[in-house]
Image (cartoon, helix red, strand yellow):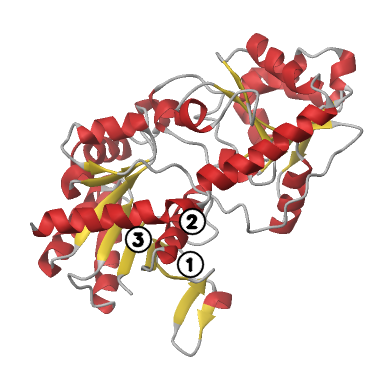
Amino acid sequence: MRRVFICTEVSFPRGGATSNYIEYLSLALTSGGYSPIVIGQGKNTEDDLQNFNNRYIYNGIEYYNYSSKVNQSKFKIKRFIDANFHQGKQIVNLLKKYQLTSEDYIIFYTTNCFTINQVLSFAKQQGTMASMCITEHHRKSQFDNRLLYWRYKYSFNYSIAKTKSVIPISRYLEKIFKDKDCNTLLLPIMANPYEFSYDIKINKNKINFIYSGASFTKDSFETMLCSFLLLTKEEKENVCFHLTGVKRENLVKYLGGKKKILDQLELENVINIHPWLEYRELIELMKEMDYLFIARETNQTTVANFPSKVPELMCYGVVPLVSRVGDYTDIYLSDGKDSIIFDGCSPEIGVKALRRAIHMSAESRITMRKNARETAEEKFFYGNWSNKIIDFIEKCRTESIN
């Protein structure tokens, strides 16, 4: 089996949404007869170690995380240089141990130009081809560190296109790299609808909404909270907005002087914060949800991005209630069938969307939940993308040889 090395600065597995992206990409490669090996940054889990061959295996995927320790110099620029060059050297050293050859392939998931340049330089010496995964287009306002913003901007504008082979997550990103004369494969966030049992659980007392994570830079969280605040007293009695993976103190910090919004929703028993859940507990909670609520402004970041929570929740029959922005609302979801899509991102618009969901009949809600699950199976299951990914790799390899 041909090996594909997925090189990243993310901890794999169990490293959040990005780690999940890498997992499903790896499983799609496996389904196509390739042997993926993930090289990431962080800790290796001893429970995943196979003593007979000294390899770390998770869900059938081999991985090895290199150390994230870097020089702690008192000089900011020196720390920046050490941190950035450190990653590429670590990856190259591991590729040497794996004895990288021209028969192998590399897929990057990083926007660190130093890492990209170092690994590509080594790969070129071995005659190894590579592709880049790109899932974001960040704005300057999302960076606290000027040097990190410079690195990201340089990487996005120059380094990513060096392979001439890019796997973008959206048509917006696809156009950018096609204009740079890159071969592209438009690939959405994938999922595995068959990982856990599927059974729609209906709460007869409440209509359950969920927001998973704490992406305050992409999602208009204040809009979501204020939308619930605008519901009537009777409507509020029939709903519960579940927040997972976020601490209350972080919400308070985010809201600042508007903390009273959260206080009011808690007083009226509209909101339920789950700062931490065991994985099985989270799965059981998601099965009980009716709707996933995401309000987003239209900007460079949101048009380029594809929220992983959309296909993830749809696997459990949860209906997306989302702003019309990006590919997921344009080419994957169908308003009124498997989702509720609304135009704009204000509380006044958000509450109208909530009311569409709240006042739907129980029978219609069940139908939509079943449709959401079917969409996850048909459009986001990693197995359905396997052949396209393999064909793309082979095409890029053939064109390079010719």
Of badges 3 and 1, the one in the foreground is 3
Kindly check if marks 3 and 1 are in contact, taking CB atoms under 8 A apart as contact. Answer: no
- Amino acid found under the numbered disc labelled 3: Ile
What is the x, y in percent for residue 139? Answer: 36, 28
| Disc ID at residue 43 | 1
Q: In which quarter of the image is the C terminus?
A: bottom left
Q: Mark 2 points at which residue?
A: 383
What is the x, y in percent for residue 143? Answer: 39, 33
- Amino acid found under the numbered disc labelled 1: Lys
Q: Is residue 52 above or below residue 2?
A: below
Of badges 2 and 1, the one in the foreground is 2
Binning the other alpha carbons within 10 Å of mark 2 as few (below 14), some (14 to 19) or many (20 upward) gives many
Binning the other alpha carbons within 10 Å of mark 1 as few (below 14), some (14 to 19) or many (20 upward) gives some
| Disc ID at residue 6 | 3
Distance (Cα) linking label 3 and label 2: 18 Å
Binning the other alpha carbons within 10 Å of mark 3 as few (below 14), some (14 to 19) or many (20 upward) gives many
The one nearer the camera, 257 or 301, is 301
What is the x, y in percent for residue 53? Answer: 44, 87
Q: Earlier in the sequence, mark 3 or mark 2?
A: 3
